[in-house]
Image: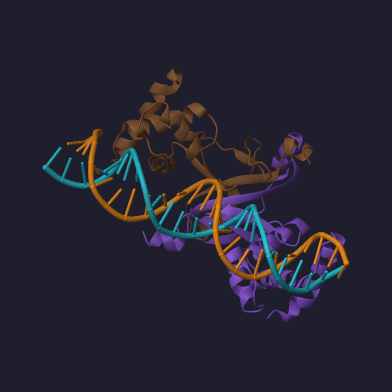
Chain colours: A purple, B brown, C cyan, D orange
Amino acid sequence: MFPATKQHTDGALVKALRAHKRRVTPQRLMIHRTLRGLNRHASAEEVFANVEGQLPNVSLPTVYSTLELLDELGLARRVGPVAGRMLFDPRLDEHHHLVCLRCGRVEDIDAPVETGPALEAARRRGYTRARAGLIVAGVCRDCTEAG
Amino acid sequence: MFPATKQHTDGALVKALRAHKRRVTPQRLMIHRTLRGLNRHASAEEVFANVEGQLPNVSLPTVYSTLELLDELGLARRVGPVAGRMLFDPRLDEHHHLVCLRCGRVEDIDAPVETGPALEAARRRGYTRARAGLIVAGVCRDCTEAG
DNA sequence: CTGGATGCAAACTCTTTGCATGCAT
DNA sequence: ATGCATGCAAAGAGTTTGCATCCAG
């Protein structure tokens, strides 16, 4: 389904799995490839729906644990929970999120945000592995027009 | 329990409720006063536990709907969901949050964050009532030391 | 009076856990 | 062969909803 990125994407995952002494399984490859192919933040449910068509007998718990693993490996980023659901984002570069309080839609914001001072404050308090994400919450155009 | 702020706090709520044509009820006054008294972000469950001692026969759904109302009235700010639970913050000035991924603790960060460009981006996309909040997620000192 | 607000209980959603089986190493 | 990873099912946590009753205006 995503032939252009398949090779490189699989290669990076296999390399990361081997480096962490984790097993390379068809489910992990397919879940990773699917999230990359969606090319936007997706819920576990969405990834699951898309993986089902590609690989039989995949379970939702496996999707959750694999997405969590991808986050640990640095090959995806867990965002949220946002609007009540956990999202997983294939984008690895810094960006932020815009959430509609009404319909739950999530969009990317590429505006720059100076997170250095906040991360520094976290470090000073003894936090490790700290990462910053800006969430802008509002009511989207459609929901605003719908009243 | 919070005599020093009680009068002013109640007054602001009563005024806001009247302005929005909503009713002034003992539950609303007590929930508002309790959140202010806690003086930190609290979950609905926490507010509920503290209100129970002050006013008999208060229900958790009422706490939820009242905290949501306070957010609408601008007398509290809903934060989250963070670490799986919705938090409500009596602080009205700009500040951000530091969350431990392990134990779920939430602390305030007072470091300045330039949210203007992100809010402007939201406005350009047609979002209304947009507000920005930075979430720094990491592992706190205690959890880091605990392994 | 009258309709918004409440209390209670139950439903709902998303996520996590337990356990037996299976497959990557 | 070994034990991590998986599938299935069921539990768990937090939040929301429905409805009869109550009380603020």
Toward which corner of the image does residue C8 lie, by quadrant?
Answer: top left
- Tell me where residue A90 appears, x and y as whole percent: 69, 64
Q: Quadrant of the N terminus of chain A?
A: bottom right
Left or right: residue A61 compared with residue A8: left
- Tell me where residue B79 appears, x and y as whole percent: 53, 44
Left or right: residue A115 compared with residue A101: right
Number of marks present in the image shown: 0
- Tell me where residue B95 appears, x and y as whole percent: 59, 37
Q: In the displayed image of the protein, which residue is found farthest to the top?
A: B4
Res. A91 visible in picture:
no
Q: Residue at x 73, y 61 (%)?
A: A70
Toward which corner of the image does residue D21 lie, by quadrant?
Answer: top left
**Which is nearer the eye, A115 or A21?**
A21
Q: Residue at x 48, y 39 (%)?
A: B44
Residue C12 vertical placement versus A130 (above, below) = below
Res. B15 visible in picture:
yes
- Tell me where residue B68 appears, x and y as whole percent: 42, 43
**Which is nearer the eye, B79 or B141?**
B141
Residue A39 vertical placement versus B77 (above, below) = below
Residue A104 vertical placement versus B33 (above, below) = below
Left or right: residue B68 compared with residue A36: left
Q: Quadrant of the C terminus of chain A?
A: bottom left
